[in-house]
Image: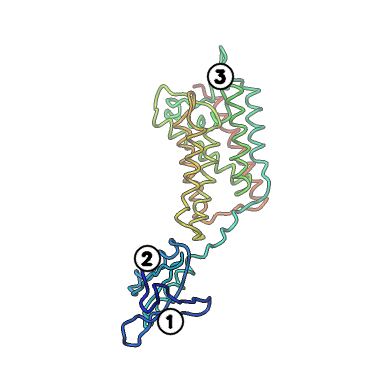
C-alpha cells in the first residue's frame, strides 16, 4: 500500500517518530486538527498486526508507506485510545519462558525393565522355536483366554518376546521412554502407571480381537510410557498458559513416533495404538489431578507392590492351565 500523507511536500512526509514521542501530521482538513503518527516499522507483518488491533478496537487509522517503512497514523483525538490498545497487544505478545518439566534426575526404571526383560527371555526363550516353552504358552496374551477370565495374561505377556530382535527393540525403547517416565514420576509411581496402562491396553486389544489372536512383547508398555509422557507434557503446557495453541504438540509427536516405530510387518499395531492412547489418558489424568512424584518411602513401597503384582500374575499363569 502506497499512500501519501496529507500535508507533505512532494509526497515525502517529514515524520520523526521517536521511542518516547508521537509526531503530529497535518491532516490537510483546514480545521487545525492534526493526525498523530504513533509508530513506524519496516515489517509489513508488524504493520498489519497494528492495523488489525486498531481495527478491532474501532479506531480510525492509516498506514502510510514511505522510504521502505510503514507509519501508523491516527486522529489526534484517538491517539490515547490507540496507544492503550497497542500497549495491551504488546503485553500479550511478549513471549513467556516455558517452565521446566519436573525432573527427578537420572532414573534406573528403564534399565531395570530392560534387565527384567532380558532375564525372562533367557528363561522363557523365544517364540520362534519348534516347541514354545511352558512360559510362553502360559503367559501369552490370548484374546480368547483373557476374555474367559485369565486377565493376568495382560501382564505376563509384557515380559515375553518372540526373538532377540524383538527383545532388543523393546529394551532400547525402555531406556528412552520408560526412563523418561521415571524421571518425571519416580520409579514406583511411574512403573505402576506404565504397568496398569499396558495391561489395560492389552485387555482392550483382546476385547477387539476376541478370538484367534495371541500376542507377546513389552512394546505395549513402551508405547504406554510414551503416551504418559505426552499426556504429562500436554497438561503442563496448557496449565501454565504458555503458547496454548501448541499444547497438543506432545501428542502429535507421540503419534509421529507411533507411525515410525509402531507399524510394520509383524507389529501389533492395535496393541501399540491402545498403549499410546491409554498411556496418554493416564498421563493427562495424573497431571490434571496435580499428582506429583511421592517420596522415597512411597516410591519404594510402590516398587515392591509392582514386583509383587508381576510375581502374582505369573503364579496364576503357571498354576492355572490355559
Q: Is residue 312 left or right of residue 72?
A: right
Front label number (2 vs 3): 2
Label annotation for residue 2: 2
Placement of 234 over or under 146, stated as above or below: below
Between 186 and 298, the one nearer to me in the picture: 186
Residues under labels 3 and 1: Cα distance? 84 Å
- Outermost residue to the front: 10
Residue at x 51%, y 21% (from the top left corner): 321
| Location of mark 1 (residue) | 24
Secondary structure of the residue carrying tag 2 is: loop
Residues under labels 2 and 3: Cα distance? 75 Å
Placement of 23 over or under 253, stated as above or below: below
Label annotation for residue 127: 3
Image coordinates for residue 145, horizontal then vertical, percent: 45, 25
Q: Which of pointers 3 and 1 lies earlier in the amino acid sequence? A: 1
Colouring chosen for the image of the structure: rainbow
Front label number (3 vs 1): 1
Q: Which of pointers 2 and 3 lies earlier in the amino acid sequence? A: 2
Placement of 165 over or under 181, stated as above or below: above
Q: Which of pointers 2 and 1 lies earlier in the amino acid sequence? A: 2
Label annotation for residue 156: none
Residue at x 47%, y 36% (from the top left corner): 201
Between 42 and 4, the one nearer to me in the picture: 4
Q: Is residue 71 left or right of residue 98?
A: left
Indicate the quadrant containing the N terminus: top left, top right, bottom left or bottom right: bottom left
Amino acid at each position: 500500500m502506497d499512500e501519501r500523507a496529507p500535508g507533505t511536500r512532494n509526497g515525502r512526509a517529514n515524520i520523526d517518530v521517536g521511542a518516547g514521542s508521537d509526531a503530529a501530521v497535518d491532516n490537510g482538513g483546514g480545521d487545525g486538527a492534526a493526525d498523530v503518527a504513533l509508530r513506524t516499522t519496516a515489517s509489513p507483518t508488524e504493520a498489519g498486526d497494528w492495523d488489525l488491533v486498531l481495527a478491532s478496537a474501532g479506531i480510525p487509522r492509516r498506514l502510510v508507506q514511505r522510504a521502505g517503512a510503514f507509519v501508523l497514523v491516527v486522529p489526534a483525538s484517538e491517539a490515547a485510545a490507540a496507544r492503550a490498545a497497542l500497549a495491551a497487544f504488546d503485553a500479550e505478545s511478549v513471549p513467556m519462558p516455558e517452565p521446566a518439566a519436573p525432573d527427578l534426575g537420572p532414573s534406573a526404571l528403564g534399565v531395570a525393565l530392560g534387565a527384567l526383560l532380558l532375564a525372562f527371555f533367557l528363561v522363557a526363550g523365544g517364540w520362534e522355536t519348534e516347541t514354545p516353552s511352558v512360559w510362553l504358552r502360559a503367559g501369552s496374551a490370548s484374546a480368547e483366554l483373557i476374555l474367559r477370565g485369565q486377565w493376568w495374561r495382560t501382564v505376563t505377556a509384557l515380559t515375553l518376546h518372540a526373538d532377540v530382535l524383538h527383545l532388543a527393540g523393546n529394551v532400547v525403547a525402555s531406556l528412552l521412554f520408560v526412563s523418561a517416565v521415571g524421571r518425571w514420576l519416580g520409579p514406583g509411581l511411574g512403573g505402576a502407571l506404565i504397568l496398569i496402562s499396558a495391561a489395560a491396553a492389552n485387555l482392550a486389544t483382546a476385547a477387539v480381537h476376541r478370538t484367534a489372536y495371541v500376542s507377546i512383547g513389552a512394546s505395549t508398555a513402551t508405547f504406554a510410557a510414551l503416551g504418559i509422557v505426552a499426556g504429562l507434557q500436554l497438561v503442563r503446557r496448557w496449565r501454565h498458559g504458555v503458547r496454548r495453541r501448541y499444547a497438543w504438540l506432545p501428542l502429535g509427536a507421540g503419534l509421529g513416533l507411533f507411525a515410525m516405530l509402531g507399524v510394520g510387518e509383524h507389529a501389533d499395531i492395535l496393541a501399540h495404538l491402545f498403549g499410546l492412547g491409554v498411556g496418554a489418558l493416564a498421563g493427562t489424568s495424573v497431571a490434571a489431578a496435580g499428582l506429583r512424584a511421592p517420596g522415597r518411602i512411597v516410591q519404594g513401597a510402590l516398587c515392591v507392590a509392582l514386583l509383587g503384582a508381576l510375581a502374582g500374575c505369573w503364579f496364576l499363569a503357571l498354576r492355572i492351565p490355559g
